[in-house]
Amino acid sequence: MTHSRYHAPLQDRSTDDDEDDDVKLPAFRRYESQGVIRQISYYLSGEIVDPIQYTDLLYTLRTASATDLIFLHLNTPGGNFDTGLQIINNIAASEAHVITILEARAFSMGALIFLAGDELIVHDTCQLMFHNYSSASVGKGNEQAAQVMASRKWFDKVMRNVCRPFLSDQELERISKGEDIWLDTDDIRRRLLHLQKGEPAVKPKGTRAKVKPVPVSASETDAAKPARSSRKSKPA
């Protein structure tokens, strides 16, 4: 068996390099993946009743994933405080994105549930109403007095946690004293827009009107200047 002493001639690769230069790579590449997104809607219509009636909603909020969308459509005069508070706490604990939609009115506890959403949607002709709680107590006089004090403290704390900054501290104080706060769609949207801008939902009242300066003479200016007191105390 004989072997050639000479290797095969090398091929000219200049033509291949020229062809590679002619192939242009795309500026970007597209990749696609699909995921499962659930959209679940609940309609809270009518009075809010005992918590046992809402276990399906509560369980859905607790077990939802971060890709789920849960819509709460509200048209309710309010109702059971304990039920509403449990719904609010489950909204806060849910991994889902919860959207509350005001479709007509949401009074009392219904208004608090509306504010608890991750995203708030308001139709054109709607109302919110906030007011103090109603309750009844039985037992000995000292027990009733203790219950009233504990309930009021609890209610005030819930209102601060849920309603601020949508409601101002002054409005919460007025509610605590028995006043009702009514807001229509224009009021609601205005407050939400202020909050989105990082501004207070309610502009404080009693701002001083701007007064145009009046030119005065130098002698009058010196006489009008108050004596300045130093904030730093001199050492003895």
Image (cartoon, rainbow, N blue to C red):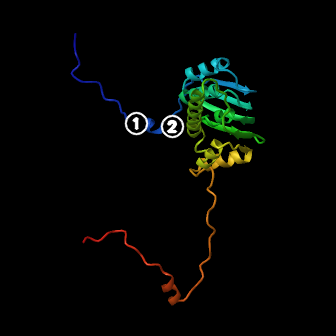
Provide residue 125's location: percent of width, then percent of height.
78, 41
* Quarter occupied by residue 211: bottom right
- Name the amino acid type tagged 2: Phe
Residue bearing mark 2: 28
Side (left or right) of 29 relative to 59: left
Provide residue 26's location: percent of width, then percent of height.
51, 37
Q: Is disc 2 surrounded by few (<14), some (14 to 19) or many (20+) residues within 10 Å?
A: few
User: In this rendering, is residue 20 above or below 184?
Assistant: above
User: In this rendering, is residue 50 above or below 183?
Assistant: above
Provide residue 65's location: percent of width, then percent of height.
55, 23
User: In this rendering, is residue 133 above or below 224?
Assistant: above
* Quarter occupied by residue 10: top left
Q: Residue at x 59, y 35 (%)?
A: 152
Q: How many marks?
A: 2
Q: Nearer the viewer, residue 160 or 39?
A: 160
Provide residue 133's location: percent of width, then percent of height.
66, 34
* Quarter occupied by residue 159: top right
Side (left or right) of 234 relative to 102: left
Side (left or right) of 106 relative to 146: right
Specify the farthest residue to the right: 125
- Name the amino acid type tagged 1: Asp
User: In this rendering, is residue 11 above or below 178?
Assistant: above
Q: Nearer the viewer, residue 213 or 138?
A: 138
Q: Residue at x 68, y 25 (%)?
A: 41
- The dot on residue 17 is 1
Q: Nearer the viewer, residue 116 or 133?
A: 133
* Element on which disc 1 rests: helix
* Element on which disc 2 rests: loop
